Amino acid sequence: RITTFSVLVFSSTGSALLSAVAFGIGFIPQLFGSLLLGSLADRLPPRALITGGYALTCATALLLAVVRMPVAASLGVVALVSLATPVFHGASSRLVAQSLKGDAYVLGRSLSNIASAGAQVFGLALGGAAVAALGPRRALAVSAVLYFGCALAVRVRLPRLEAGEFGGTPGGDSGAVRASLRGAGLLLRDRTVRRLMLAQWLPVALVAGAEGIIVAYAGERQFAPGWYAVLMGCLPVGMLVGDLLVGRFLRPRTRERLVVPLAALAGLPLIGFAAEPGVGVSSGLLLLSGLGY
């Protein structure tokens, strides 16, 4: 959805900056959503949260597809919805963390990344084809239908668990915002946790910043319609291959020693874009960057 929205903004304005803002607006508000609403992931039943997240995303995509709003208004809608995204994702992550322990959690996260990367590749291929065939607005309508299907699937297939059944704290003794801020404070006061968070956030944030201008890059280089999706799909393909290699063939100690080199690998290939390469070289650079994830 967010890449199609970025295409919509770029096709409407021709602005690389606004296209990048449209891509980033789906992520930046999540910082504030985590700080203010993160405790809800522990307090509310996971099935309701995850289903509600897909349903809300469905409604947003449908609104953007049907209503012709000014760019600023559409950016505001996406930003507002993104505030709640950490709650839905937090519920999913909590279920995984509660079910897997020790190195099984590391491998489970790797498997989750592989599934996510595969879904991104499929979604980008479908999205690129839909944009090329239908245009960005109708493609957003298609994504709304798919999100509705996801909400329905989670509602039917995910067991009904109360917050306490998966390690959460239903109710609690304080408001959600106060509890969220207190939890964030506890984490950030721990020096080791701060370092781990920085190591997890910073490399991904820098690559995501570059990812946000792929749509504009493809447009300004006059690549064929839909090729932006091929370029964006190279990152999750690289991530999928990297997770398979690292998770399947490397021991835990070796994986830990490779954290810094892999973080560098995520960023170094992007320097090649200074030469303004064509589709083939651009795809190769993004594949290499994805391996580092």
Image (spheres, grey):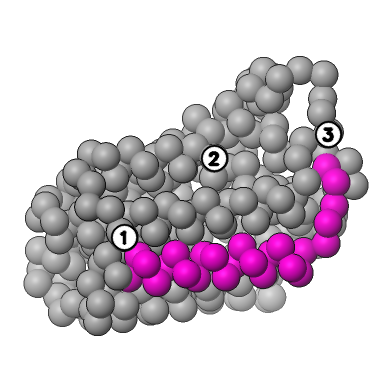
Nearest the camera: 91 or 191? 91
The earlier-in-sequence mark between 2 and 1 is: 1
Residue pictured at 22% horizontal, 52% vertical? 68
Q: Is residue 161 inside the magenta stretch?
A: yes
Disc 2 to disc 3, C-alpha distance: 18 Å
Q: Nearer the viewer, mark 2 or mark 1?
A: 1
> Between residues 56 and 293, which one lies in front from this camera angle?
56
First reached walking from the N terminus: tag 2 or tag 3:
2
Q: To which quarter of the image does residue 101 belong?
A: bottom right
Question: At which x and y percent is residue 79?
Answer: 39, 40
Give me the residue at 40% from left, 72% from top. 142
Mark on residue 84?
2
Q: Residue at x 28, y 53 (%)?
A: 67
Crowding at mark 3 (Cα within 10 Å: few <14, some 14-19, many 20+): some
User: Residue reaching furthest front?
Assistant: 67
Q: Is residue 17 above or below residue 195?
A: below
Q: CA distance from mark 1 to mark 3?
A: 37 Å
Residue at numbered disc 1: 65
Q: Name the residue that disc number 3 marks.
A: 170
